[in-house]
Amino acid sequence: MTKKELEEFRAQLTQMKIKLQNTIRGLRNELELVTGSEDGINDMEDLASLERESIHDNTLLAQQQRELSEVIHALSKIDQGTYGICEESGDTISLERLRAMPHARYCVKDAKKLNR
């Protein structure tokens, strides 16, 4: 991988990190509003609706936090000089895979084997 490609991946991952952090912040704010608004609700339908929204937001929040963790891990691999190297086999991760999923930890062969 060239130095230019590596810097392009760093820029892309940094943008992903910022976007994910903003999304997570928004979801947390929304969850605070939803949980804070349950106090004055007497209607069972409204309460059920708020609960569904809360469950959805919590699920989305957990997924976004996992993805942020993967992005941060990929950025640290760039700093360590190990970006683009499969964590299972040590093989090179193809540029095509990294372009599709810049935070990939595994080459396609090992990702299939590990079901990731």
Image (cartoon, rainbow, N blue to C red):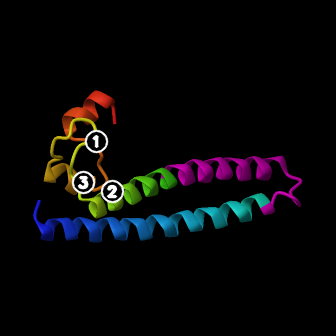
The residue carrying pointer 2 sits among few (fewer than 14), some (14 to 19) or many (20 or more) residues within 10 Å by Cα, namely many
Q: Is residue 44 magenta?
A: yes
Q: Secondary structure at mark 1?
A: loop
Q: Main secondary structure of the magenta part?
A: helix
Q: Please state which of residues 81 and 48 is positioned toward the viewer in this rendering.
A: 81
Q: Earlier in the sequence, mark 1 or mark 3?
A: 3
Residue indicated by mark 2: 74
The amino acid pointed to by label 2 is Ala
Q: Which mark is residue 82?
A: 3
Q: Residue at position x 60%, y 54% from top?
A: 57
Q: Amino acid at mark 1?
A: Glu
Picture coordinates of residue 83, whole percent (x, y): 24, 55
Tell me which numbered mark, 3 or 2, is placed earlier along the sequence.
2
The residue segment tinted magenta is 36-63
Q: Residue furthest front?
A: 80
Q: Secondary structure at mark 2?
A: helix
Q: Quadrant of the N terminus?
A: bottom left
Please state which of residues 65 and 43 is positioned toward the viewer in this rendering.
65
Decide: is 113 above or below 76: above
What x and y, as percent, mark residue 9? 24, 65
Q: Secondary structure at mark 3?
A: loop
Give the residue displayed 14% in from the left and 48% down from the top: 94
Q: Disc 3 versus disc 2: distance between alpha carbons?
A: 9 Å
Name the outermost residue toward the top: 113
Residue under label 1: 87
- Residue positioned most to the left: 2
Amino acid bearing label 3: Thr
